[in-house]
Image (cartoon, coloured by chain):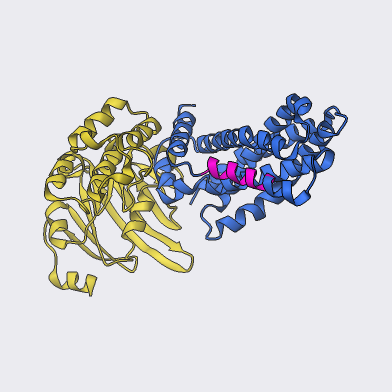
Chain colours: A blue, B yellow
């Protein structure tokens, strides 16, 4: 755990100093909600449409963070420094996924109030259950995002490869998160169908195990 | 400096390719523990690739590689942490300070923070240790990179042009850490044959990934040297 802690503290310190991921993610989300606000030209959104707008925006904003997740390791020799140390390589997976999870949580602290403000989906009632969905979805995005970022970081077309690989892999997560959110944002206010958090939990578990199994090989020469 | 009869590095027919290009072609050598090997050769000869194979960062594609008594790549886990690498890249994060970088590497290698402070002091960087690496001069970055390479007191040092960017005063400061006096087994990439001869027990000339020159005992055939760079 001390290795994970060292890697995570290093990433968070660098992000606090350079501000390369989180501000870009948050600004992208706000800008997208502004575009939807004017593009849809409605006083308020609800149901499926509100859920779709929220989750597609969060997912696209997450891609910005995924794109930059391993850039310092590649450009500043972080991979070599880490691989020279006598540590479990899975520590990097855990640390990077945790960092991405924290970026996503930070993004949502800004994006969800902006969503409520600009598109008035009636979030107040839905918030406690929405938080559970955000938590489960963030775990999945963090794990899959870390896997995709590690797969693509050495490629010349990284900015293209990340969405091409990540979006299909994240599609089940998007469906489950949006379907789970839609009833919460209905005009009358609905309750969260339990099968969608269950699907998200299963997704997190499957991709968590898959990432654990293959991550070492991604760092190999 | 004590040279042991036990080899720290044994290579037999080491071959490594990048796609179609042969970077190392049947390299063989034995380097006793405590000895210094100097690698000479023109750009693209395979010197840096050899260092990266020895550092466990690249897998050999053929041949036998034994480092510190363990076969690579199979036992790479057992020698990581016993090797220090100082390459072209300082392996330091630009947005972190020198001290933060070294503390990070110290945590990875389970080394105490007092070692970080002692090394920064030894290379004359204590006063600038809390400034981001991006604000330091290239020579200062190289001094911090030396600290990083020896932080965990490695038995084997792999050095790629270690004196680059260092003025004479800075070179003298890092000498006890990475020079012959450090007592470590060393593989040093050099571009000056005279300097290589002066500090090495064995000199190896690489060209096109092949060993084309071997010299020991401070003598180097001028014709062979001319052919190496010719």
B220, A80: nearer the viewer:
A80
Q: What range of the chain is rendered magenta?
A: A21-33
In this rendering, does residue A59 appear at all? yes
**Residue at the spot x=27%, y=41% of the render?**
B144
Would residue A175 be visible to someone looking at this image? no
Looking at the image, residue B217 sits to the left or right of residue A216; the answer is left
Q: Which residue lies furthest to the right in this view?
A: A188
Q: Is residue A186 left or right of residue B168?
A: right
The spot of residue A58 in percent (x, y) is 67, 42
In-front residue for pair B124/B58: B124
Residue B97 drawn at (x, y percent): 33, 37
Can you say whether A186 is above or below B163 in the image?
A: above
The chief SS type of the magenta part is: helix
**Picture quadrant where residue A206 is located:** top right
- Number of numbered callouts drawn: 0
Asked if the magenta segment contains residue A48, the reply would be no
Horizontally, residue A94 falls left or right of residue A203, namely left
Could you say where residue B230 lies in the image, as x and y percent from the top left?
23, 75
Q: Which of B12 and A70 is in front in this view?
A: A70
The spot of residue B57 in percent (x, y) is 41, 49
Nearer the observer, B37 or B92: B92
Is A24 one of the magenta-colored residues?
Answer: yes
Q: Which residue is painted at 75% across and 51% down in the image?
A: A39
């Amino acid at each position: 755990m001390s290795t994970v802690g060292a890697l995570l503290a290093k990433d968070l310190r660098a992000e606090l100093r350079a501000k390369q991921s989180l501000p870009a993610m948050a600004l992208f989300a706000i800008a997208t909600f502004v575009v939807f606000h004017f593009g849809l030209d409605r006083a308020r959104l609800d149901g499926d449409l509100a859920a779709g707008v929220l989750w597609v925006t969060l997912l696209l904003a997450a891609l910005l963070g995924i794109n930059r997740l391993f850039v310092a390791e590649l450009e500043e020799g972080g991979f070599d420094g880490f691989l020279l140390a006598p540590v479990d390589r899975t520590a990097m997976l855990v640390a990077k996924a945790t960092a991405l999870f924290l970026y996503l949580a930070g993004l949502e602290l800004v994006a969800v109030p902006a969503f409520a403000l600009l598109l008035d989906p009636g979030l107040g009632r839905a918030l406690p259950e929405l938080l559970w969905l955000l938590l489960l979805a963030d775990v999945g995005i963090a794990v899959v995002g870390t896997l995709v970022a590690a797969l693509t970081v050495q490629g010349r077309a990284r900015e293209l490869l990340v969405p091409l690989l990540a979006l299909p892999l994240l599609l089940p997560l998007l469906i489950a998160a949006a379907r789970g959110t839609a009833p919460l944002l209905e005009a009358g206010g609905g309750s969260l169908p339990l099968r969608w958090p269950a699907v998200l939990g299963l997704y997190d578990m499957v991709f968590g195990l898959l990432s654990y199994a293959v991550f070492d090989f991604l760092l190999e020469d | 400096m004590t040279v042991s009869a036990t080899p720290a590095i044994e290579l037999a027919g080491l071959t490594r390719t990048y796609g179609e290009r042969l970077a190392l072609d049947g390299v063989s050598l034995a380097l006793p523990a405590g000895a210094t090997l100097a690698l000479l050769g023109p750009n693209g000869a395979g010197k840096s690739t050899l260092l990266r194979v020895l550092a466990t960062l690249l897998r050999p594609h053929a041949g036998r590689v034994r480092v510190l008594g363990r076969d690579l790549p199979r036992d790479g886990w057992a020698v990581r942490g016993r090797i220090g690498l100082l390459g072209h890249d300082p392996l330091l994060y630009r947005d972190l300070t020198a001290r933060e970088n070294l503390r990070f590497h110290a945590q990875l290698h389970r080394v105490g923070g007092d070692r970080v402070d002692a090394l920064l002091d030894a290379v004359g960087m204590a006063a600038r240790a809390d400034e981001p690496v991006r604000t330091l001069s290239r020579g200062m970055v190289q001094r911090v990179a030396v600290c990083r390479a020896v932080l965990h007191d490695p038995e084997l040092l792999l050095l790629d042009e270690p004196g680059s960017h260092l003025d004479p005063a800075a070179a003298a400061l890092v000498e006890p850490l990475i020079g012959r006096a450090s007592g470590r087994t060393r593989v040093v990439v050099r571009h000056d044959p005279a300097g290589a001869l002066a500090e090495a027990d064995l000199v190896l000339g690489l060209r096109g990934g092949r060993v084309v020159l071997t010299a020991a005992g401070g003598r180097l055939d001028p014709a062979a040297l001319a052919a190496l760079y010719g």
